């Protein structure tokens, strides 16, 4: 069975955020999109560090599964952020003050 058996609902602001990230990462392979599980929408490698970004609209809310995944990942020392804009995403990965 394919890993991509899910068709996750994408937030309307995700393409804009991904395009902005493509402008600063070394390669498009440095950004991976989630396949529909509770893990964050994007995995971003930037300056030798892995960041997990959950994209939400201005009023978007985390599901219970997403909240649990994020809490556990943070407890394990992962860099996990909920981002709502390009600026949020760039700040999260340290590309903008």
Image (cartoon, grey):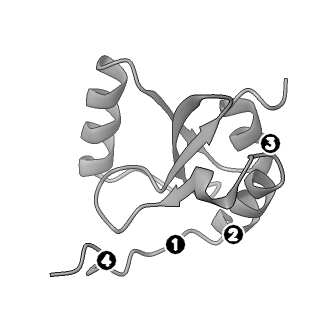
Q: Do the residues labelled 3 and 4 touch (CB within 8 Å)?
A: no
In this view of the protein, which residue sits in the foreground, 41 or 84? 41
Q: On screen, 10 above or below 92?
A: below
Q: Are marks 1 and 2 in contact (CB under 8 Å)?
A: yes
Whole-percent x and y of residue 9?
A: 44, 75
Q: Distance between the residues labelled 2 and 3?
A: 14 Å
Q: Distance between the residues labelled 3 and 4?
A: 29 Å
Mark 1 or mark 2: name the one nearer the start of the chain.
Answer: 1
Q: How far apart are marks 3 and 1 (CA)?
A: 19 Å
Q: Identify the residue under disc 2.
A: 15
Whole-percent x and y of residue 42?
A: 52, 53
Mark 2 is surrounded, within 10 Å at the Cα level, by few (under 14), some (14 to 19) or many (20 or more) other residues, namely: few
Mark 2 or mark 3: name the one nearer the start of the chain.
Answer: 2
Q: Identify the residue under disc 3.
A: 87
Mark 4 or mark 2: name the one nearer the start of the chain.
Answer: 4
Q: Distance between the residues labelled 4 and 2?
A: 19 Å
Q: Identify the residue under disc 1.
A: 10
Name the residue: 25% across, 72% down: 3
Whole-percent x and y of residue 20?
A: 80, 55
Mark 1, secondary structure of its residue: loop
Q: Quadrant of the N terminus?
A: bottom left
Mark 1 is surrounded, within 10 Å at the Cα level, by few (under 14), some (14 to 19) or many (20 or more) other residues, namely: few
Mark 2, secondary structure of its residue: helix
């Amino acid at each position: 069975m394919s890993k991509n058996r899910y068709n996750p609902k994408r937030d309307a602001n995700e393409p804009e955020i991904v395009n902005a990230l493509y402008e600063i990462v070394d390669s498009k392979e440095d950004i991976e999109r989630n396949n529909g599980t509770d893990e964050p929408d994007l995995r971003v490698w930037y300056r030798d560090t892995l960041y997990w970004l959950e994209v939400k609209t201005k009023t978007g809310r985390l599901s219970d599964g997403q909240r649990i995944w994020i809490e556990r990942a943070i407890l394990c020392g992962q860099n996990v952020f909920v981002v709502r804009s390009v600026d949020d995403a760039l700040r999260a990965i340290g590309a903008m003050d």
